[in-house]
Image (spheres, helix red, strand yellow):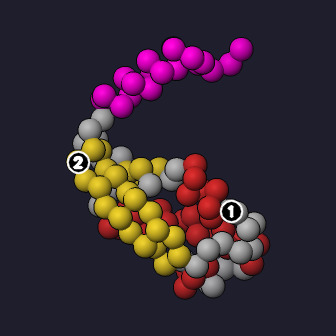
Amino acid sequence: MRGLYGLQAFKKMAKKEEASKVILERSYVIPLRRETLKSPPFKKANKAVRTIREFISKHMKSDDVAIGKYLNLDIWKHGAKNPPHKVKVLASKDDKGKVFV
């Protein structure tokens, strides 16, 4: 079997959470329409992901940006050709400089 399951996985996740402490948490509405219009239709969702990374790295002053599962699903919900025009996100930065959106 691959990966960790059950109690082992929980213990490993708890260690990771204890190691990093949230020092900054902000809410943003990220405009995607103007940037996705610059790209061809089949690359619009990819461009939206890149735009989110650039926006968050600029505003949270960190190059280490992780996009969460549900934000990614929301961007790709209607396929690669039709991402949302704007997204509302909650960005949190830990003491190591990693930003999770």
The numbered disc on residue 59 is none
**Residue shown at 38% from the left, 57% from the top:** 91
Q: Is residue 15 above or below residue 95?
A: above
- Within 10 Å of disc 1 (Cα), the crowding (few <14, some 14-19, many 20+) is some
**Residue shown at 74% from the left, 78% from the top:** 41
- Secondary structure category for the residue under label 1: loop
Q: What separation in Å lies between label 1 and label 2 (alpha carbons)?
A: 30 Å
Residue type (three-letter) at the residue carrying disc 1: Trp
User: To which residue does mark 2 refer?
Assistant: 23
Q: What's drawn in magenta, residue-wise?
A: 1-19
- Secondary structure category for the residue under label 2: strand
Q: Is residue 54 visible?
A: no
- Within 10 Å of disc 2 (Cα), the crowding (few <14, some 14-19, many 20+) is few
Cβ atoms under marks 1 and 2 closer than 8 Å: no
Q: Residue 45 appears in which quarter of the rendering?
A: bottom right
**Would you say 97 lies left or right of 84 here?**
left
The N terminus lies in which quarter of the figure?
A: top right
Residue type (three-letter) at the residue carrying disc 2: Ile
**Would you say 9 lies left or right of 63 here?**
right
Main SS, magenta residues: helix
**Residue shown at 26% from the left, 38% from the top:** 21
Q: Residue 48 appears in which quarter of the rendering?
A: bottom right
Could you say where residue 4 lies in the image, as x and y percent from the top left? Answer: 59, 18
User: To which residue does mark 1 refer?
Assistant: 76
**Residue shown at 46% from the left, 68% from the top:** 88
Could you say where residue 58 lies in the image, as x and y percent from the top left? Answer: 35, 67
> Considering only order in the chain, which callout, 2 or 1, is on the residue closer to the N terminus?
2
Q: Is residue 62 visible?
A: yes
Residue 3 magenta-drawn?
yes
Could you say where residue 101 lies in the image, as x and y percent from the top left? Answer: 44, 55
| Total number of numbered discs in the rendering | 2
